[in-house]
Amino acid sequence: MVTAFVMIKANTGEADRLKDSIESIEGVQSAHIVAGDVDLIAKAQVETPAAVKEIAATHIQAIEGIEDTQTYIAMD
């Protein structure tokens, strides 16, 4: 099992709508609106690193209102 965290920058005022869209993606365990350099953090648990790429690069980045993402794969 691969656990990954996706840091998400969103357009101003879009975080609540985006949280619901992100949480509906298969493999995403949770999404949280946060304060700091990013607007949301999503946690994904999937079978392979390729599935992490699918979630971050294909699904999350395709949502209107997403400005940027950075993905971190947990090592433990």
Image (cartoon, rainbow, N blue to C red):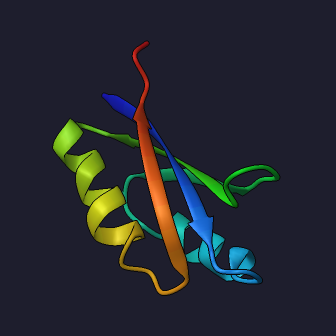
User: Residue 64, how many percent across, how many down?
Assistant: 48, 87
Vertical arrangement, residue 69 with respect to residue 48, above or below = below
User: Residue 21, how many percent across, how many down?
Assistant: 54, 76
Instruction: Tell me, yes or no, if residue 41 can be seen here.
Output: yes
- Residue drawn at 64 percent across, 70 percent down: 19
All told, the count of numbered labels is 0
Q: Nearer the viewer, residue 42 or 36?
A: 36
Q: Nearer the viewer, residue 7 or 30?
A: 7
Instruction: Tell me, yes or no, if residue 48 can be seen here.
Output: no
Vertical arrangement, residue 62 with respect to residue 48, above or below = below
- Residue drawn at 23 percent across, 48 percent down: 51
Classify residue 33 as left or right of residue 5.
Answer: right
User: Residue 44, how many percent across, how many down?
Assistant: 44, 45
Q: Nearer the viewer, residue 44 or 36?
A: 36
Classify residue 30 as left or right of residue 69.
Answer: right
- Residue drawn at 33 percent across, 58 percent down: 55
User: Residue 39, how many percent across, how many down?
Assistant: 70, 61
Q: In what quadrant of the picture does the N terminus appear?
A: top left
- Furthest residue in direction right, as rendered: 35
Classify residue 9 as left or right of residue 72.
Answer: right
Quarter-wise, where is residue 57 in the image?
bottom left
Q: In what quadrant of the picture does the C terminus appear?
A: top left
- Residue drawn at 25 percent across, 51 percent down: 53
- Furthest residue in direction top, as rendered: 76
